[in-house]
Amino acid sequence: MTKFYFFCHSGLGKSTLVNTLFKSQVSRKSAGWARDEKIPKTVDIKSVSHVIEEGGVKMKLTIVDTPGFGDQINNDNCWEPISKYINEQYEKFLKEEVNITRKKRIPDTRVHCCLYFISPTGHTLRQLDLEFMKRLSHSVNIIPVIAKSDTMTVEEKQEFKQRVRKELETNGIEFYPQKEFDDDMEDKSDNDKIREAMPFAVVGSDKEYQVNGKRVLGRKTAWGIVEVENPNHCEFAQLRDFLIRSHLQDLKEVTHNIHYETYRAKRLNENGGLHPICDTQESNL
Amino acid sequence: MCQLGPASSGSGSEGEASLSRRFPEIEGGSRSNMTANIRYKSRIPVKTEDSIEEKQYVGFATLPNQVHRKSVKKGFDFTLMVAGESGMGKSTLVNSLFLTDLYKDRKLLNAEERINQTVEIIKHTVDIEEKGVKLKLTIVDTPGFGDAVNNNECWKPITDYIDQQFEQYFRDESGLNRKNIQDNRVHCCLYFIPPFGHGLRPVDVEFMKALHEKVNIIPLIAKADCLTPNEIKKLKDRIREEIDKFGIKVYQFPECDSDEDEEFKQLDKELKECTPFAVIGSNTVVEARGQRVRGRLYPWGIVEVENQSHCDFVKLRNMLIRSHMHDLKDVTCDVHYENYRAQCIQEMTSKLAQDNRMESPIPILPLSTPDVETEKLIKMKDEELKRMQEMLNKMQQQMHEKDQ
């Protein structure tokens, strides 16, 4: 089972992108807040699971959404509910693992990937972006993505990406694929190419239009049609290939072998080690 | 025979001369002002009925021309504030609106440098001229607004600034030398709403509510080229709804006069239904449809800033500059400033009533001392009157005793 986790301010096209990525309605699009619904005061965590199939291969995909993130006037510590959620999943897995009688296949609810949507201001990262990524890049694979990139011209995109990469580097934020986990030279060169192209500037759409005789996914404006899968228009295709066609398994492995192990080591060093769980010890955790 | 023509209080010949000075289209020549006025209308053949009309033509129909000349000589000024998060295209839009480059040497701060930045207020002033009319344009920028993690009360520096300008004007107005009052009051605030959301965010609502009674707010949807026409319509409807719901008083276009023609009324109606305007700005010129226009070049097409089917930039420019600039100034002076002034005076008088000492929080002493002075005078006169009354009573008594 693969679990995808999406974050950002509402309105940056998360749901549309997810639906476009998986070519199915896996994410319910929020049409904005319903008339009497207010923007939630705290960050909500909503998770929805689907089983999708392709070529005989089944995948259980869970999308975890965080409506309300960054929407308040005071967003101090709005990353805490998210951090807590991620750690809770690790904890669940850990508990199962140290059990005396444990299941053969431990249900894996850990978060394998976090797509962080950056607002396409064209200037730099926002403070909130930095704070969030700093805190979470060590516990989960973060893939930064520039949302709604049809608002930038080609030059603006390049400049923005360069600035964002530089800022991430200056602040010591390692996004996936992390340099330190490259297995060998071949991996490194592949991943280097990807790192140079990140963050991917994407556009999502679930509507089809006729362009040059073909039906394509796109966005129609008065001055032209933005084609989602056209590499000259945006980097959606690159993101999809990277995320699903080449690195899906690797995302899971890095989560299991590195992030989870880090968490486990930290937990085992506290409390002088973990004992096989019995109910009375719940309170210690 | 009454003297006709502009405020001339001299003899006939003087009046003529002044007339021909002021209205070069009037030929000078004959003695009486009446004849000069006939020449002013000289293109119409004179008939006997007209001379009766001529007798009833006083001449103050030329007042608009006089006002025009004086204003052009004096020049105009306008203060525009732009507010919104960074990256909304505020500077680009201002440059596009006024066809200037106000931000040539701007350096963008990176996110780390911005961590401890509070909201600043920066003024840029530029003198521009068009067809002989001079405009002193001041743009008040608010970098840092809404950029922090915690944006509590991030609008406070802005409301403080606006209040300060009102206070300064209030003081100048109450002062002794009122010849050269500098008017730095903010006439209009363009507020940029991000197109990425689903409507107004809490920070948008709070900002507008804090400012709607101090300045004319015009909300705009920024970077509108990332929205399809459908999305723009939905967002506009949503924002208008929320503005109503939260009771935000944005700048309202004045109603058309009932005697305007239908076409104008139709245009006016369309303008009102188009708010908030969805705008795009550009600092670059691109080639589109054989012409060089301001626009943005994308791989999938070219967005033209001045194309009405692409965005509402033209509508905004027409409204802001070509038809309602003066009304914005009027509303600022007649409504927002007067509210501030009334509030100020009320606070002052209630404070004075509370404690009789002359300690006023706002040092507008020139205003309070005359009152105290006259009070003193009145008191003195009262006492004098009392004394005189007593003396009179004494004298009366003496006389009465004498009589007896």
Image (cartoon, coloured by chain):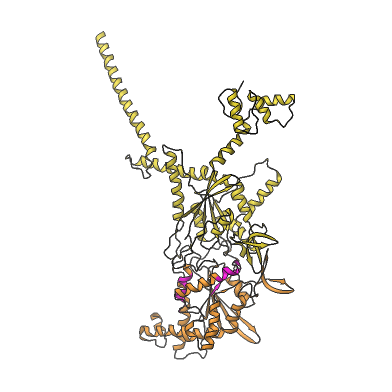
Chain colours: A orange, B yellow
The quarter of the picture where residue B388 lies is top left
Quadrant the C terminus of chain A occupies: bottom left
Compared across the picture, whether B397 is left or right of A57 comes to left
Q: Nearer the viewer, residue A63 or B150?
A: B150
* Residue beneath the point at 56% across and 82% down: A2
Instruction: Name the residue at the front extreme.
Output: B29
Please tell me which residue lies in front, B41 or A24: B41
The residue range painted magenta reads: A129-158
Q: Is residue B223 magenta?
A: no
| Residue B261 relative to residue B275: left or right | right
Q: Is residue A138 magenta?
A: yes
Tell how many labels.
Answer: 0
Residue at point 68% right, 46% down?
A: B264
In the rendering, at what x and y percent does residue A167 appear? 47, 72
**Which residue lies most toward the top here?**
B403
In the displayed structure, B129 sits above or below A75; it is above
Q: Considering depth in this image, is B108 or A236 the residue closer to the camera?
A: B108
Residue B362 in percent (x, y) is at: 38, 44
What residue sits 51% from the left and 62% below the top?
Answer: B86
Across and down, in percent, residue B15 comes to 59, 26
Q: Is residue A37 shown above or below B336? A: below
The quadrant of the rendering that contains the N terminus of chain A is bottom right
Does residue B404 appear anywhere in the picture?
Answer: no
Residue A80 % position (x, y): 45, 72
As drawn, B312 above or below B17: below
Q: Is residue B98 visible?
A: yes
The image quadrant of residue B403 is top left
